[in-house]
Image (spheres, rainbow, N blue to C red):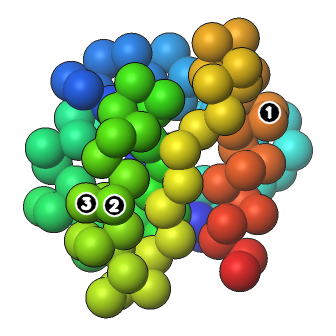
Amino acid sequence: MVKIGLFCSAGMSTSMLVSKMKNEAKSKGIDAEINAYPESELEQVVDSIDVALLGPQVKFLLKKAEAICAPKSIPVEVINPVDYGMMNGAKVLEQALSLASK
């Protein structure tokens, strides 16, 4: 099972995207746990995720997120703004799975 954390300002705007990603994972038979969190909780949940994705609105926090995730070998990236804006669960799931396999 791959555990994916999506992080944004308050964990609210990513909730709809998480739903779409969960539906996509289920339809493809992918065993994934996907949750949305406020970016302020990254340090608390870093031990329970395999991949961290940041919402485009908090991309300025990428260096901070990398500093938290790197010691635990957890990949972190900013979600593509177009995929985020379109709430493209398939593309964002693909991005997360690609990161997890590195």
Secondary structure category for the residue under label 2: helix
- Splitting the image into 4 quarters, where does residue 64 fall? bottom left
Tell me how far mark 1 sits from mark 2, CA to CA: 26 Å
In this view, 46 is above or below 55: below
Q: Of helix, strand and loop, which one carries label 3?
A: helix
Q: Residue at coordinates 13% horizontally, 61% vertically from top-left?
A: 44
N-term-proximal mark, 1 vs 3: 3
**In which quadrant of the rendered view does residue 79 lie?**
top right
Residue at the disc numbered 3: 64
Q: Which mark is residue 63?
A: 2
Asked if the residue under mark 2 is in contact with the one under mark 3, i.e. CB atoms within 8 Å, the reply is: yes
What amino acid is found at the position of numbered circle 1 in the picture?
Ala
Could you tell me if residue 23 is visible in this image? no
Mark 2: give few (<14), some (14-19) or many (20+) Cα within 10 Å.
Answer: few
Q: Which residue is mark 1?
A: 90
Q: Please report the residue visible at 63 percent of the width from the left and 12 percent of the height from the top.
A: 85
> How far across and how far down the image is residue 56, in percent?
48, 29
Where is residue 10? Give x, y as percent.
Answer: 21, 24
